Amino acid sequence: MNNDKRTIVVTGGLGYIGSHISTILLNRDWNVIIIDNCSNAESNNLENIKRSTLKNLGVENLLTFYQTDLCIRDEVDEIFKNHHEEIFGVIHCAGYKAVGESVQFPISYYRNNIDSTLTLLESMQKYGIKNLVFSSSATVYGFPKELPLIETSPIQPINPYGQTKYMIEIILQDLYNSDSLWNIAILRYFNPIGAHSSGYLGDKPKGTPNNLMPYLVQVIEGKQKYLQIFGDDYDTHDGTGVRDYIHILDLVEGHICAIDKMYSLFEKNNLSFGIQNLSFGIQTFNLGTGKGYSVLEILKTMESLIHRKIPYEVVERRTGDTGTVYANADKAKEILGWSPKYNLFEMCQDSLNSEHKS
């Protein structure tokens, strides 16, 4: 790898979001170090990342992979010890992420998500790497008291998964308060769907999916008998829950914009010979489209693509589910220069395409 501070560590880099981030970073001439324990990643996603880049065989010189758990301090420290001179920053995607599962196994979620982040931050701090993009979640808002949600909306997570995300946000704020040389972007995701245009990458979790789109795709492929719709008595236009779905490539672009902003400030400070002290600081951004779609709207869009009906059954609401959630992402547009580009049809089409390659 080149020793020019053009390397990004992506934790959870083989997962749905992390694999797309890794691919786009490689296509944007960044070197990438992936750390993943492969607990919820496709076994062939490393090869799929390579297939999805524009560099073909040249990607071998730009990509390094470590299969390890972020909770194992010695192994994480060894990675940063070996690579710290070339690392510019970290995009932290690793962590358990299923809301329902977090309610069943809260201790596992607190242990994994908090411990892994603390271990990561300790190594970053030890080796002077202070640029971080953190994958947070719209679940920190809980039951919305206002819509659309803005970054200063009340924070009231209602499940252990959301609690871990908010706890990490607090940790990062305290870290920045102790050392203002850190640059930290906290990205609150709404509902990513879709896939890379190559078709090799997609949302393909191990076991039964916890999210709507991968489960719906499995129903279409005959791997599941029917889609369960959790409640049709919400105060929405068709009774089903409304969420702010965002194309995975739009979500990834938010990460790239944050890293590019930090790197631009890094270059300007290097050219200023100490006269300037430009800082990103710590900032929080919603990443969503600002538009909500219901479960039935997603279902009907997929039916229009495959030209047949999709079987579904309405069941009881899940504990902790809210009726309507969507974002105001003006801050990301203003500060990061980011805005979503894909529509619902494209999100659904790309989700289908990714199922046919692996």
Image (spheres, helix red, strand yellow):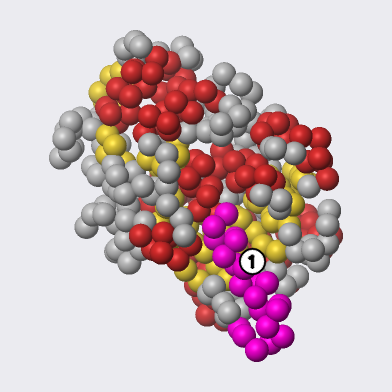
Write the residue at 46% across / 55% down: 338
Tag 1: amino acid? Tyr
Instruction: Looking at the picture, tell me which residue is in the foreground, 268 or 147.
Output: 268
Total numbered circles: 1
Q: In this view, does 8 lie to the left or right of 311?
A: right
Residue 348: quadrant of the picture: top left
Mark 1, residue position: 263
Instruction: Looking at the picture, tell me which residue is in the foreground, 356 or 68.
Output: 356
Q: In this view, does 303 lie to the left or right of 41?
A: left
Write the residue at 76% across / 34% down: 56
Instruction: Looking at the picture, tell me which residue is in the foreground, 327 or 13.
Output: 327
Q: Where is residue 55 in the image (x, y as percent from the top left)?
A: 75, 39
Q: Where is residue 192 in the image (x, y as percent from the top left)?
A: 45, 41
Q: In this view, does 240 lie to the left or right of 44?
A: left
Q: Relative to residue 31, is residue 127 depicted above or below?
A: below
Query: Overall secondary structure of the magenta stretch?
Result: helix
- How crowded pointer 1 is (Cα within 10 Å; few <14, some 14-19, many 20+) is rated as some
Q: Does the rendering let one see residue 108?
A: no
Q: Does the rendering let one see residue 332?
A: yes
Q: Relative to residue 332, is residue 129 depicted above or below?
A: below
Residue span colored magenta: 256-277
